Amino acid sequence: MKTQGINKNFLAIEEKYSNLQDSQIAIVSAPYEHSTSYGKGASLGPKAILKASAFVEFFDDEFDSELCFDKGIATIKPINFKQKVDKNALDLIGEKVDELIRMGKFVVTLGGEHTISIAPIQAHYKFYPAMSILHFDAHSDLRQSYEDTIYSHACFMARVIEFFPPEKVVQAGIRAQCIEEAQLIKDKGIKTFYSSAIRRNLHNENWQKEIVDNLGNEIYITFDVDYFDPAIMPSTGTPEPDGFFYNETLEVFREINRQRKKIIGFDVVELAPVKSLHHPNLTTARLVYKLLNYAFNR
């Protein structure tokens, strides 16, 4: 399995710390975009994240460590979808993630539209049957189909709960959905923390703790960057007002560590970079590195 060189890999780190054999972490780029329905450009997200990561500092003061040198981070060459779409595209992603998990790697998948998350979730579920899913998003993505396809980015979670127990899904930040999705959440027992409810203190002031209380001991995170407020994340296909900010989100991950629960893998999706607007790319790259620090510094 080929990796990216220092000029294209995550954090722009030398081969000693980024070769696949010695690295505990592997990053998979899935620049897939087939169903985006408003703003375009999600296929450019993985490359933009990797490019911006060269400007993320290695040292994390919260953990007093340089994780990239302690654990090693290998960046796999981007998946070439060769015109494959829908299930065929997902199969390509799933095969790559499955192979890396079997090698004992902690796998991060970068999208791409949110459809790609179906594959790494399914791959992780085979190895972690007790896992929970923590889904950060402005949208619940539970439509049965959208714009004539069941593989739309608006349907990814509906496809996930066809093979994964819906009562083990926790959603955070939701603020845009149709009535059928809202009813499905009630019918299936999905634990959804709506933005409006959080802002009205219906989950008390420590909503982050309540989210983590509802998760099992092994957690897979799927993170759509449109969860963030457009003020800090304008570079996404479907930005929604009344979103969330960086530090209040980190409190969710801090609470995971306080409760001694374990992040087993994650994906970050839906960054649609805007030319000459750099901060969303850097924010996303920093989020990836920060999530890795929470996963490994427990």
Image: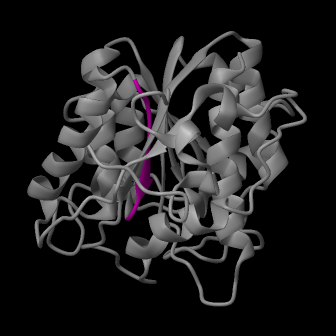
Give the residues drawn in magenta, as a range.
105-112
Counting from the top left corner in percent of width and height, residue 203 is at 75, 33
The C terminus - image quarter? top right
Query: As rendered, which of 143 and 106 lies closer to the eye?
Result: 106
Quadrant of the image occupied by residue 115: bottom left
Question: Is residue 212 toward the left or the right of residue 244 in the image?
Answer: left
Q: Position of residue 215 (x, y in %)?
A: 55, 19
108 in magenta: yes
- What secondary structure prevails in the magenta region? strand
* Residue at point 54%, 71% (across, down): 48
> Was residue 143 drawn as part of the magenta stretch in this picture?
no
User: Is 270 rendered above or below residue 18?
Assistant: below
Mark yes or no: residue 135 visible: no
Colouring mode (rainbow / by chain / secondary structure / one colour): one colour
Residue 293 figure quarter: top right
Between residue 150 and residue 124, name the one nearer to us.
124
Rendering coords of residue 105 (x, y %): 41, 26
Q: Along the horizontal axis of the image, is 27 left or right of 164?
A: right
Q: Is residue 3 visible?
A: yes
- Between 230 and 266, which is closer to the camera in this rendering? 266
Residue 153, placed above or below residue 87: below
In the image: residue 94, left or right of residue 179: left
Residue at the (41%, 18%) spot, across then down: 131
Relative to residue 264, is residue 155 drawn left or right?
A: left
Q: Residue at x 14, y 47 (%)?
A: 91
Residue 160 pos. (x, y %): 27, 39
Which residue is depicted at the point 76% across and 34% down?
A: 66
Total numbered labels placed on residues in the image: 0
- Residue 61 position (above or below residue 178): above
